[in-house]
Image (cartoon, rainbow, N blue to C red):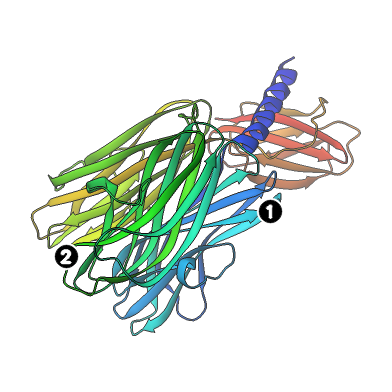
């Protein structure tokens, strides 16, 4: 009876995962920690994710974080479906020193295995050493064809356009919402301003922008940016805009170039447990504090075990001489390397993403800031942006029908070692062990009815799968 209940529970999980694959996004993510690597010559893969999609659909690939280049070098960075990058909207770049970046692309995929990459290359400007340090995150979101949740993306390539005067639309997307819902809109990429100009940039539901968290900006130098907003929509056509304007500081020519993407993700009403958003508007605050300053927070109620993708992006103005560390986090603090980004001395844009595994229930996520290490200024900063959290349930890959037969795992619960007892008529079988994320963590060919397995994994729940020809056996394993 116990085994039957376990198998029914696993079948329920698998059935649930297939339903979610059809109606809700699936997320994969990897942190990137690459210190002082040589990126001159050919493009270098600094991170990659291979996914298995259950049906055809669309993927949204996002690579963000922070890059430190040597003086005189230009480091091209890209989220891509190949181990290379394209010009214009197919990449962003960091020049000379430390800078935050954000790059998004979308691709159509068929059912099956697909790999996506975070790539970097020292390209064109090569007066430095060719070495760079890159810390960030690569994420892949899958939207099944025909599902109630979907994504639309357009690349933006605008060279030397006049944005002085009224706001200028540099890209737009119209989506046909099948029902009332919410749309998460992001405009990210690279901006080339004229020296002496400030270029305001925004993702918006109108061909204009608002102050504080309603925009971000680039001043004087070429820089990356990321701006996100969240809007309630009704069923039918809804249009969203990427807008730009030379505003405030107008000592240059008013001409600018824009290369990036405008992305709109639609979530039907009632899916509030799957996406949450808050704008952040904090002016002249003292962030020379410990613990870090809590700029904003979101609490979600996860209906089951799953994964959350947390992003904090926007614009920070620092006091000269200060370095402001910024992070999206599951605690009111930040970690090193891929656990934060930073802004030094003046005003810069930023984007920081983290991924966390969650159990069912309530979870809170934070946007935090701290004046850390470089403290030659006043410790006062202004930070405008957004914090958003996206949840997806865990998925196990759809597998063959499970046969209720005499597969036994003991002891269960176990420590590092357990014994797998198989049916006496077994010939040659394949053993696979999955974690609760559906990730394959162990695989071995077996030809004995009793096999000792040394797993050496963290405490938790695992799924043991044995396939012998057309027979498939599953058992839940608990490690303590």
Quadrant in the rendering for residue 242: bottom left
Q: Position of residue 171 (x, y in %)?
A: 43, 58
Rendered image: mark on residue 406? none
Is residue 117 toward the left or the right of residue 386 in the image?
A: right
Q: Residues within 10 Å of mark 1 (few under 14, many from 20)?
A: few
Q: Nearer the viewer, residue 429 or 187?
A: 187
Q: Residue at x 32, y 37 (%)?
A: 278
Residue 463 sits above or below residue 64 on the image: above
Q: Position of residue 27 (x, y in %)?
A: 54, 44
Say if residue 195 shows up in the picture: yes
Q: Residue at x 71, y 27 (%)?
A: 11
Q: Position of residue 189 (x, y in %)?
A: 40, 62
| SS label for mark 1 | strand
Q: Earlier in the sequence, mark 1 or mark 2?
A: 1
Residue 126 sits above or below residue 54 on the image: below
Residue 327 sits above or below residue 101 on the image: above
Q: Position of residue 195 (x, y in %)?
A: 22, 74
Mark 1, residue position: 113
Mark 2, residue position: 249
């Amino acid at each position: 009876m116990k085994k039957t209940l376990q198998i029914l529970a696993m079948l329920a999980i698998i059935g649930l995962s297939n339903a979610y694959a059809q109606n809700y996004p699936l997320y994969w993510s990897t942190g990137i920690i690459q210190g002082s690597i040589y990126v001159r010559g050919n493009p270098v893969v600094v991170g990659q994710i291979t996914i298995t999609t259950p049906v055809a659909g669309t993927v949204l690939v996002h690579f963000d974080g922070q890059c430190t280049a040597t003086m005189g070098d230009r480091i091209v960075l890209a989220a891509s479906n190949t181990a290379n990058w394209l010009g214009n909207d197919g990449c962003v770049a960091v020049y000379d020193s430390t800078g935050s970046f954000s790059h998004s692309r979308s691709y159509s995929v068929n059912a099956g295995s697909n790999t996506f990459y975070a790539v970097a290359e020292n390209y064109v400007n090569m007066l430095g050493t060719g070495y760079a340090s890159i810390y960030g995150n690569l994420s892949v979101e899958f939207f099944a064809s025909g599902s109630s949740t979907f994504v639309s993306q357009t690349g933006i390539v605008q060279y030397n356009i006049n944005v002085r005067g009224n706001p200028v639309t540099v890209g737009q997307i119209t989506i046909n919402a099948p029902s009332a819902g919410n749309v998460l809109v992001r405009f990210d990429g690279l901006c080339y301003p004229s020296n002496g100009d400030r270029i305001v940039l925004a993702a918006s539901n109108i061909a204009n922008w608002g102050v504080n968290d309603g925009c971000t900006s680039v001043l004087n130098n070429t820089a990356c940016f990321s701006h996100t907003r969240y809007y309630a929509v009704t069923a039918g056509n809804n249009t969203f805009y990427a807008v730009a304007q030379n505003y405030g500081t107008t000592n240059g020519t008013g001409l600018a170039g824009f290369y990036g993407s405008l992305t709109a993700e639609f979530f039907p009403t009632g899916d509030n447990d799957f996406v949450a958003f808050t704008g952040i508007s904090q002016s002249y605050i003292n962030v020379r504090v410990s613990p870090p300053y809590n700029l904003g927070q979101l609490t979600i109620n996860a209906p089951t075990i799953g994964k959350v993708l947390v992003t904090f992006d926007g614009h920070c103005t620092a006091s000269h001489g200060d370095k402001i560390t910024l992070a999206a986090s599951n605690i009111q603090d930040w970690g090193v390397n891929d656990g934060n980004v930073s802004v030094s001395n003046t005003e810069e844009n930023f984007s920081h993403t983290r991924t966390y595994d969650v159990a069912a229930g309530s979870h809170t996520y934070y946007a935090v800031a701290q004046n850390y290490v470089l403290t030659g200024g006043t410790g006062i900063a202004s930070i405008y942006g957004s914090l958003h959290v996206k949840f997806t349930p865990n998925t196990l890959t759809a597998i063959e029908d499970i046969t209720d037969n005499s597969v036994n795992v003991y002891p269960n619960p176990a420590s590092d070692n357990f014994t797998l007892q198989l049916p006496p008529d077994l010939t040659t079988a394949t053993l696979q062990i999955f974690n609760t994320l559906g990730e394959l963590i162990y695989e071995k060919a077996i030809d004995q009815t009793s096999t000792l397995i040394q797993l050496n994994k963290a405490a938790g729940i695992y799924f043991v799968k044995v396939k012998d020809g057309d027979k498939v056996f599953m058992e839940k394993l608990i490690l303590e």
